[in-house]
Amino acid sequence: MNKAVTLKAIVAAIASLLSSPFLIAEDILRWGDFEEAVEVSTDADRQRFQVEGWEFGNEPPRIPSGWILHHAQKGKLTIVQDDAKSGNVACKVEGGGWIHAPFPARADSRVNISFQAKGEGKVRVMIFQYEHDSSGSVIQFLDTAELETVQLKEEWTEYKMQHHFSVPAVNQAHIAFDVQGMAVLDSVIIEQAPE
Ligand SMILES: [Ca+2]
């Protein structure tokens, strides 16, 4: 083979590898370690973050940055400092609450999901799926994907699951936890699975 052609092919191959967003598994959920929080001390804060009806175990009340407390499935949320799996804090949810957090999705791709949890009862893991327009507004709510319901243990346990985005219109998703009992959650990681 012509040397110049070979070199050109190698350069092209390297360039295409470097431009691939899936070359290195990257956590696409920004807030899975619960390390940052915002205060929701006033009625105005609670309205702004749509957490009316939720109870809080911290004083002043705080919610983990990047996470949404479900507007209808309310419970009690506490940022716990004495028992974290990663960093300094973890997130305790009880009283029937659901929490969810957004991450980008691509139709026909797969994501690997892992998280650490401990507590009593069960956690049902779901993926809310959406089609967004280019400004980030919801065009349509797509089917919610049920992943697994895991039984919680007293000690920290890592749970792993995978999701395939089979709905063609999907371009945004939320990982959602329906806590049936009491769960302390930490180290939620979502990575694009290799093609
Ligand atoms: Ca943490």
Image (cartoon, rainbow, N blue to C red):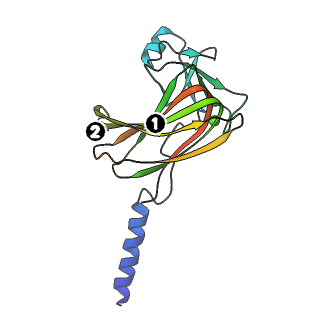
Report x, y in % for residue 156.
Answer: 69, 38
Q: Which mark is residue 77?
A: none
Decide: is 52 above or below 193: above
Q: Secondary structure at mark 2?
A: loop
Give the quarter the ligand 1 occupies. Answer: top right
Residue position for label 1: 126
Residue at x 48%, y 14% (from the top left corner): 46
Decide: is 60 above or below 124: above
For label 1, count other residues whose C-alpha is less than 10 Å away and answer few (under 14), some (14-19) or many (20+).
Answer: some
* Residue situated in front as seen by the camera: 69 or 62: 69
Residue at x 36%, y 72% (from the top left corner): 12
Q: CA distance from mark 2 to mark 1?
A: 25 Å
Report x, y in % for residue 29.
Answer: 49, 41
Q: Which callout, 2 or 1, points to the residue nearer the camera?
A: 1
Report x, y in % for residue 167.
Answer: 31, 45
* Residue situated in front as seen by the camera: 144 or 85: 144
Left/right of residue 101 with respect to residue 170 in the rendered view: right
Q: Secondary structure at mark 1?
A: strand
Classify the position of the N terminus by image quarter.
bottom left
Left/right of residue 78 with respect to residue 163 in the rendered view: right
Residue at x 40%, y 43% (from the top left corner): 104
Report x, y in % for residue 19.
Answer: 40, 61
User: Callout 2, which amino acid?
Assistant: Ser
Classify the position of the C terminus by image quarter.
bottom left
Mark 2 or 1 closer to N-term? 1
Left/right of residue 127 with respect to residue 179 in the rendered view: left
* Residue situated in front as seen by the camera: 81 or 116: 116
Q: Which mark is residue 134?
A: 2
User: Callout 1, which amino acid?
Assistant: Met
